[in-house]
Amino acid sequence: MTSERSERRYSSGLLDTCTLIDLDTIPPETLPVIPEVSAVTVAELAAGVHTTRDPVQRSLRVTRLLMIEANMDPLPFDDDAAKMYGNLCALVVAAGRNPRPRRLDLMIAATATLHRVPLFTRNVDDFKGLDSQLTVIAV
């Protein structure tokens, strides 16, 4: 189920990588009370530190990553998440879409699905076809 905006505040939910990147611009009341993060998102953010040559941008990215590492305990991408990832890829294919360009998004979605929490994202379209398994909240 995809929701443009939740009428109630969720007690917990997984924040997509793009949500964490834009966190300073998102009204806190649109986010879950207890935000969760996936180990896959931490990996994306860690890689992102090394993809810019701009020292100011690199500093911002390092600060964001350190803040997340200090304040959040990432949900793992483990064997069960890997199996769920395969199921979600099948749903994406059934919806006529290619799962390859959204591999990391699907790994994050698998983590949210496995832990039965909604996924809060700025990019709802990345999760089309997963409605039967995942609640996606647009922020």
Image (cartoon, helix red, strand yellow):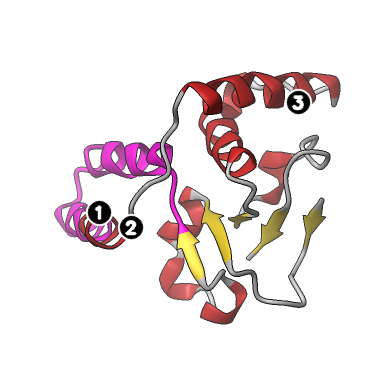
Spatial CA span between label 2 and label 1: 6 Å
Check disc 1 and give the amino acid type.
Answer: Glu
Q: Which secondary structure lies at badge 3? A: helix
* 138 in relation to 135, above or below: below
Check contact, mark 2 vs mark 1: CB within 8 A: yes
**Where is residue 118 drawn, in percent x and y?**
65, 54
Residue that label 2 marks: 72
**Where is residue 66 drawn, in percent x and y?**
20, 56
Check disc 3 and give the amino acid type.
Answer: Val
Q: Which secondary structure lies at badge 1? A: helix
Left of 122 or right of it: where is 93? right
Residue that label 3 marks: 92
* 35 in relation to 107, above or below: below
Left of 79 or right of it: where is 56? left
Q: Residue at x 52, y 79 (%)?
A: 28
Spatial CA span between label 2 and label 3: 29 Å
Residue that label 1 marks: 69
Which of the 4 image quadrants contains residue 12?
Answer: bottom right
Pointer 3 or 1: first along the chain = 1
